[in-house]
Image (tube, helix red, strand yellow):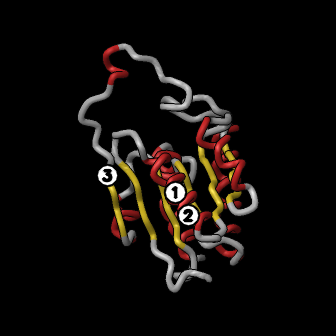
C-alpha cells in the first residue's frame, strides 16, 4: 500500500547516528513491503550496515556517489562530479514513483561543501509532490532545508570514546 502522504525528514547535528537512523527507517519500511532508494553522497566503500542491506535488495536500492575519501577543505573535482550525478539520480528516484522512501544520505554536508546548492536539493525534493517520504541526512543542514522540513532531528554528541583514543570498530561504527 503506497503512502498517504510523504513528508520531509532531516537528520542533522554533530552527533553520531544520522545514517544509522535513516537505515533503520529503511529496514522498517522494507519490513512493511515498501520500496526504498538510498543515495549516499561522499561515500564510496561498503560499510557493515550497507552490507546488511543486501539482504533486502529486492526492496532497498543503495547507490554511492563519492570516492570514499574524507573531504576536508575544498572537494576534489571528481567528488563534486559524483555528488552532482548522485543528486540527479536521487531526483530521478524521487520522481519515478518506484520508491516509497528516498534517503539522501550526507546530502546536507555535500551541500555545505558546495557540491550542489540548497536550491538544487530543494528542487529535487519538490519532485516528490508529497508522494514520497524523503530523508536527508548529514551535518550542517541548511536553514532553508530545515524550514522546508516536516521533521528535523538534531543528533548531539554528549560523549564519545573516540576522543579517548578508541578507533572505529567494524560492526559498531562502520
Q: Is any part of residue 173 visible from this angle?
A: no
Q: Quadrant of residue 33?
A: bottom right
Residue at x-position 63% and y-position 54%: 39
- Tags 2 and 1 in contact by the CB under 8 Å rule? yes
Question: Which numbered tag is attached to residue 117?
Answer: 1
Question: Which numbered tag is attached to residue 154?
Answer: 3
- In the image, residue 49 above or below residue 145: above
| Disc 1: CA contacts within 10 A as few (<14), some (14-19) or many (>=20) | some
The residue sitting at the right extreme is 58
Q: Position of residue 68 (x, y in %)?
A: 64, 32
Give the mark nearest the N terminus, 3 or 1. Answer: 1
| Disc 2: CA contacts within 10 A as few (<14), some (14-19) or many (>=20) | some
Give the mark nearest the N terminus, 3 or 2. Answer: 2
Q: Position of residue 80 (x, y in %)?
A: 63, 43
Question: Which numbered tag is attached to residue 120?
Answer: 2
Q: Mark 3 falls on what kind of element? A: strand
Q: Position of residue 32 (x, y in %)?
A: 59, 70
Amino acid at each position: 500500500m503506497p503512502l498517504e502522504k510523504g513528508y520531509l525528514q532531516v537528520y542533522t547535528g554533530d552527533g553520531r547516528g544520522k545514517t544509522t537512523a535513516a537505515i533503520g527507517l529503511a529496514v522498517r519500511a522494507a519490513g512493511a513491503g515498501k520500496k526504498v532508494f538510498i543515495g549516499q553522497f561522499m561515500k564510496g566503500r561498503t560499510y557493515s550496515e550497507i552490507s546488511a542491506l543486501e539482504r533486502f535488495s529486492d526492496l532497498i536500492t543503495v547507490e554511492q556517489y563519492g570516492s570514499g575519501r574524507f573531504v576536508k577543505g575544498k572537494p576534489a573535482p571528481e567528488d563534486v562530479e559524483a555528488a552532482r550525478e548522485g543528486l540527479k539520480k536521487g531526483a530521478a528516484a524521487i520522481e519515478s514513483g518506484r520508491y516509497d522512501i528516498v534517503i539522501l544520505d550526507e546530502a546536507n554536508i555535500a551541500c555545505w561543501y558546495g557540491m550542489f546548492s540548497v536550491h538544487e536539493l530543494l528542487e529535487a525534493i519538490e519532485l516528490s509532490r508529497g508522494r514520497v517520504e524523503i530523508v536527508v541526512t548529514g551535518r550542517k543542514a541548511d536553514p532553508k532545508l530545515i524550514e522546508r522540513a516536516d521533521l528535523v532531528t538534531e543528533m548531539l554528541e554528549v560523549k564519545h570514546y573516540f576522543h579517548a583514543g578508541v578507533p572505529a570498530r567494524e560492526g559498531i561504527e562502520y
